[in-house]
Image: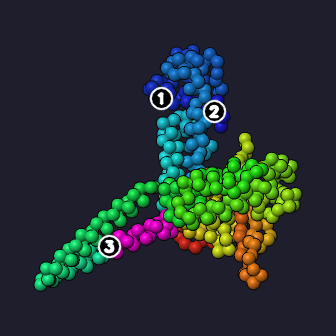
Amino acid sequence: MAETRLTGSRIRERRMSQRVRQADLARSVGISPAYLNLIEHNRRRIGGKLLVDLARELKVEPAQLSEGAGQALVSGVNAAAARRPEKDEIETDRAEEFAGRFPGWAGLVATQAQRIEELERVVETLSDRLTHDPHLAASLHEVISTVTAIRSTSAILAETTDIDPDWQARFLRNMREEAQRLSNSAAGLVTYLDAGAEAREMQVSAADDLAAFVEAAGYHFEVLERPAAGEGELAILLDGAEELRDRGARDLARRMLVRYLSDARAMPEGPFRASLAATGGDPARLAEGFGVALDAVLRRMASLVPAEGEARRGLVICDGSGTVTLRKGVEGFPLPRFGAACPLWPLYQALARPAQPVEAFVEMPGQEPRVFRCRAVSLPRPSSSFDAPPVHEATMLIEPVEDRGGPVLPVGASCRICPRETCGARREPSILGGRG
């Protein structure tokens, strides 16, 4: 319903909140109570002098009666309604009327819906940590082991009456050392947990460091885009990367940057952008035009800084075991940091169909489900010998798109935080309530 058609509802709500009788208000502006009744039920349009007179009597600005609730407030109410599985039971066609008549309540509903979404994201991330974080598991194991050692020592001291003084002193010294160790372990664990849902505060492996390095740069390294870029530029990037904390992380980052530099040399940014526009973003035609493999084109597309009006592209690369080795996130398409991802992703379908491109439109669950076009391909990595088994690597480009208007594949991030209860690929129960 258009906002101007709800002016009458707002007049009625304002009049009733001020305890003004309909007949008295009609008399004060020179119209009949019957006509005012039609206006208040949105059966007569109103504007001009009559609207101004009514606003004056109701002690409100005319715009508050004619324009009503802001579009942002109405959108917030609609977004809150979209979160409920029983959408058919909600009068979504009256959202503007509700926001116009009760802006305070409407604001509360919208704010709570946003807060719920934020908390769900925190729960998803923390659940991912509690389930798969090796550092957290090791820390808990150390705490439990220390507590057990202290308990055993204290039991000996409590149950034995004739302990040699030297042994007693040794037991007490061990208890003191174990207690100090327990205190340090517990303090470290609390500090680790206090990092909250921020992934950058929870780097626990070389692959984690690489992910933070890629995220910080957005998988775009300007110095490597220069025609003369080489070993010097690689060294500058590696030396200045605070995210790379050890040699293992630096080795992973170096291999990634060497391949990035190779892609940039084979597909210079200027010509590549021009070809991207000319081909309509078709990776197969781009690969043929530049004489490169299809996975190189997908990586190159993900490396470009979005032009004005373009959406950021995401990238996921995994090895033959399905382990994600490189990830560039995109809003609305969460990438699990620990554990396995959704087996329905085209990334994993590509592993089962080597050298055959896979394309699918997928939908991620959420407050407002997002649709993405995912294009993936699995290709063998270069082998160092003829008798070595082939090692495949799958690459998937993720592009946000508007609702395709046709069938899409419902997917998720990972089973533990996916609300799709009826999914046939589910490996374990979700900690979230089902919503699709």
- Residue 402 is situated, as x and y percent measured from the top left of the image, at 72, 50
SS for callout 3: helix
Which residue occupies the foreground of this view, 162 or 53? 162
Q: Crowding at label 2, few (<14), some or many (≥20) Cα neighbours within 10 Å?
A: some
Callouts 3 and 1 close, C-beta under 8 Å: no
114 part of magenta stretch: no
The mark nearer the N terminus, 3 or 1, is: 1
Q: Is residue 155 above or below residue 330?
A: below
Q: Which residue is mark 1?
A: 16
SS for callout 1: helix
Placement of the C terminus among the 4 image quadrants: bottom right
Instruction: Assign the magenta stretch its main secondary structure.
Output: helix
- Residue 69 is situated, as x and y percent measured from the top left of the image, at 57, 33
The mark nearer the N terminus, 3 or 2, is: 2
- Residue 194 is situated, as x and y percent measured from the top left of the image, at 41, 56
Residue depicted at x 83% and y 60%: 287
Placement of the N terminus among the 4 image quadrants: top right
Q: Which residue is mark 3?
A: 146
Per the rendering, the mark at residue 3 is: 2
Region of the chain picked out in magenta, as a range:
128-145
Which residue occupies the foreground of this view, 223 or 328? 223
